[in-house]
Every structure is written in C-alpha cells, then in structure tokens.
Amino acid sequence: MDHSRCENCIIRQFNSLRAMSKEELKKVSDSKTMRTVKKGQPLFEEGEKLNGVYCVRAGVSKMSKLSPNGKDQIVKLATKGEVMGQRSVIAEEHSNLSAVAVSDMEVCFIPKESITSTLQKNPNFTLEVLRHMANELREADDVIVNMSQKTVKQRIAEAFLYLKNNFGEDTDGFLALTLSREDIANVVGTATESAIRIISEFKKKGFIHTSGKRVGIQDERRLKDLAEGF
Amino acid sequence: MDHSRCENCIIRQFNSLRAMSKEELKKVSDSKTMRTVKKGQPLFEEGEKLNGVYCVRAGVSKMSKLSPNGKDQIVKLATKGEVMGQRSVIAEEHSNLSAVAVSDMEVCFIPKESITSTLQKNPNFTLEVLRHMANELREADDVIVNMSQKTVKQRIAEAFLYLKNNFGEDTDGFLALTLSREDIANVVGTATESAIRIISEFKKKGFIHTSGKRVGIQDERRLKDLAEGF
DNA sequence: TTTAAAAACTGATATTTATCATAGTCTTAC
DNA sequence: GTAAGACTATGATAAATATCAGTTTTTAAA
C-alpha cells in the first residue's frame, strides 16, 4: 500500500479530510506535494498569500503573530493531523499568522483549489470543516480567558500540563516536545526572563525537573492545583 | 410587508441566514419566537444546553466567561445581525459563554433544528456559516495577541475606538453604547479600579470627555497613537 | 423629592511582571 | 576539541497592575 497517497493516509482520520470521498481524495493526492521542514524553518509568514494548506504528517509547528515591539505571541501549536492555513484559505485572506517548525516536520501541501472545490461540492466535507472550526473557536475563547484571568505562573503550569497531555513524554521522563524558554514565554505571553525565573522556581519546589532545556513533570497534582488557582 | 417575518427582515443581510432559500426562511420564520430582553437580563448562561440560536435584531449583548476568582472576562460584544449560540449548536456542546444584555435587546430565538437541518441540506448556507466562523476565529486570534502584547492603557484606548467604530456616537458626542466601568474592565481584562484610573487619566489628558458613566472621544488621533504604541 | 443602593472615584500599599545588566552553560560548526 | 554564538540563569531595579479601604457621585426606587 502506498502510504504517500491520501487515500491510504491514517493522519486523515484526525482532520476534516476524512469527510472527502474516494474520488476527491484521489484528486487531492494527485495535486499535493510532500515536503520536509527542518526545526526552525518557516512554513509561511504572516501576511503571506497562501496558495494552499499544509496537512501535518509529523512534527510540530508554532503559529504566531509578531508585534511592533518585537514580541512574538504563539497562538497555537499545530501537530499531526492539523490542517494549517485552512482558516485563511476559507476566508480568502492573507495569513494572519506565521508558522515555524519547532521540531522536524513532514507536511503535505494541498493547493487551495482542491479544498475550495470540495467545499463547493461536498456538503459533508464543509460541515466537517465547520465543526472543526467551531472547536478551534472555543479553544481560542479559552485562551483569551486564561490570558486575562490567570497569572503568568498559572499559565506556565498549564502550558507544561498541555505539553504532557498533547505530546507525551520520552523514555527518560521528559516532555517529548522541547520548547526553548523563549518559546514557552511566547506561548504564555510573558518576558523570557520571567518564564525562566518561574521555571527555576517550579524546579526548586519539585514540580518539575530539568536537564538543559528539557523539562520533565514531577508533581502533576501540585502543578494542576497551581494552574487552577489553589 | 410583515417585518416580523424572516423573509422580509433586513437584519438577515448581516449574517449567514442570507444564504438560506425562500422556503428555508419560511420554515425558520414559522418556528422562531421573538423576545425582548431588558438591559442586565441574561439570554443564556455558561454551561447551559442551547436549544437554538438567538438572532439579534436590536441592542447589544456581552458574551463572557466567569472565572473561579469571580472575574468575568468579556470575550465578545454581539450586536445587530449577530447569531448568538451558533458555535455551541454546531459543535453540539453546551455553551462556553454566558450572554447578558448590555442594552435593551430584541432577539429572535430560532430552534436548533431549523439550523442543523439547513446545514445538512443547503451547502451554500454551510459555506456561508463557515466563512463567518473563519472571521470570528481571526478576530479571536487578534484578541489573544492584544491581551498578551498590549498594556492595559493601550487596550482601553482600543476599546473606546472599537466602541466608536462599531456603535457610533449619539447626538451629544458620546459613545452610543454606554458600558459600566466594570464592563470596560472586563472587556480589556483588568481590575475595575485600574480601568477607572486610566479613564480618569485619559480625561485629564484630553483624549476623552465624560459625563457620569458616559464617555465621548475627543482626540481620536492621540488615542489611536497610544493604542498602537507611540 | 427623598433616600438607599449602586456605581464611580481616589489614595495608599502590595504584588506581579518587565527591563537591564551580566555571568554561566550548552551547542554546533569548524 | 575548541571557540563563537546562542541559550539559560540570576540579581537589581523599575514599571505596571492589583488590592484594600474609604469617599463621593450617580442612579433609581419609594
């Protein structure tokens, strides 16, 4: 079985492409191009016109927005199954976010015609995309609330729990996805030094253990309590 | 012409209901119920199961989420044309937000069956809803970035400009939508006292003028500069 | 119109977070 | 293996924001 064909791709089950028909998938598969992206490399930039979407087969990308003062707010981490750029293609806008790989990635680029034509013809697909987007919108609402109601300490605790739940741990008990301190700061929206300070504090208190930039969770219970405000 | 019928309702042009067919609109119109909501009254609560959506004909509602510490973050102000509760109905979830009128409202309650059945049958409608939601998602991303990268002062300046652009001014030169200081604080995610202090400062500097809780914009240029970080 | 309640305001202070400076520690490319 | 550059770490300080306590003003109900 040719796993480079969308028809046979398991990843599809995680996203709205599962609502496509066999024929539609064949067309997508014929038009798509595979691409590997090394850690640190960009997939696309804020303001760029996207001619298609990126379906993530492996690895993780940060999606962020740069501010005039040089800070880069990470809005979302896109991982296996995620279709990046979908929002911009649907709204027919230039991208509102930049995407940069935070680990080596394997992605499929799907030209936007494949997507938009299926949106016109297959109501099941459209509905499936709509459901996905409804979920993303709730998640975004939650982030807004967290940003405004939780302290930096709580947000960092939450970020570590999120990383564990979504990307798991390696065999040594460290979080499988290692982010730089700067990226962690940009996820929770604080200064890099503040993030580092709080990470040190968590380590001293025995919530986590670290080795270089790697972080492992030691006391999930207390991290959770902190994140929830006890 | 009967303006209580959706077919003849102008408001429809502002939202995804414009993609409905004549027959679908008739069905919606037969199943809907009109309701007035006084300022301060709730439309629905966070966690509530919504049996339909609310189409706003007049007035404004705040959509917010309560945190354990008692703060209420306002995520969105819904106004004429907005279809409230759509996200929850599509995702088949209980509402993630509460809705409370901030001015006297007139809304139409549309049972969810009218919406979901049209979503199944009319791809144009589904696509239209999808486009709307793609826009809401970008707006939510923008709020996240503002929350984390701008100071409270900048966010309050922005809020006043937003209120002017979206709701206009009355004949006396005050913002047509008057929010309490507490609501303003909850929009920008700060303590009520902090918001009041900054509003006083804006007044002293001549950016705005006030009368009771009402606020009027005096120097839009400088407010804009402040909001953008100059 | 009076009056009680709610909302707006102000000051003092505490806490949180950012900024600047500098030192140590990892990587990575040669 | 080592040197340069990038990242992590920590201290000192400044700035932003929250909290608490109280006063004044506004609003709305009797």
Image (cartoon, coloured by chain):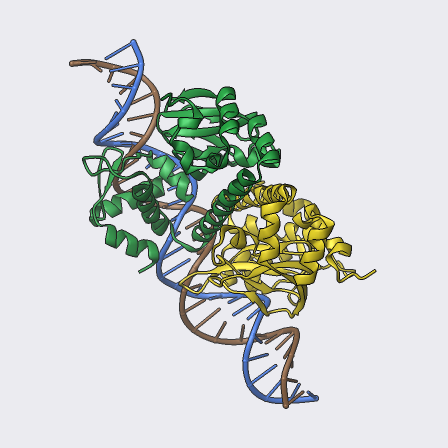
Chain colours: A yellow, B green, C brown, D blue
Q: In this view, does A58 lie to the left or right of A67?
A: right
* Front residue of this view, candidates A2 and B85: A2
The relative height of residue A72 versus residue B56 in the rendered view (above or below) is below
Residue at the spot 62% in from the left edge and 54% down from the top edge:
A83
**Residue B225: horizontal and vertical position, in percent?**
29, 56
Question: Does the image show residue B191?
Answer: no
**Residue B91: horizontal and vertical position, in percent?**
61, 37
Tell me the quarter of the picture where residue A187 sits. bottom right
Single out the residue that lies furthest toward the right. A1
Single out the residue that lies furthest toward the front. B22
Q: Is residue A88 left or right of residue A118?
A: left
* Front residue of this view, candidates D18 and B5: B5
Give the quadrant of the C terminus of chain A.
top right
* Front residue of this view, candidates B104 and B212: B104
Question: Does the image show residue B115?
Answer: yes
Tell me the quarter of the picture where residue A29 sits. bottom right
Residue at the spot 23% in from the left edge and 37% down from the top edge:
B174
How many numbered marks are there? Answer: 0
Q: Is residue A72 left or right of residue A209?
A: left
The relative height of residue A178 versus residue D26 in the rendered view (above or below) is below
Give the quadrant of the N terminus of chain A.
bottom right
**Residue A212: horizontal and vertical position, in percent?**
66, 68
Residue at the spot 53% in from the left edge and 34% down from the top edge:
B86
**Residue B57: horizontal and vertical position, in percent?**
39, 28
The relative height of residue A51 versus residue A151 in the rendered view (above or below) is below
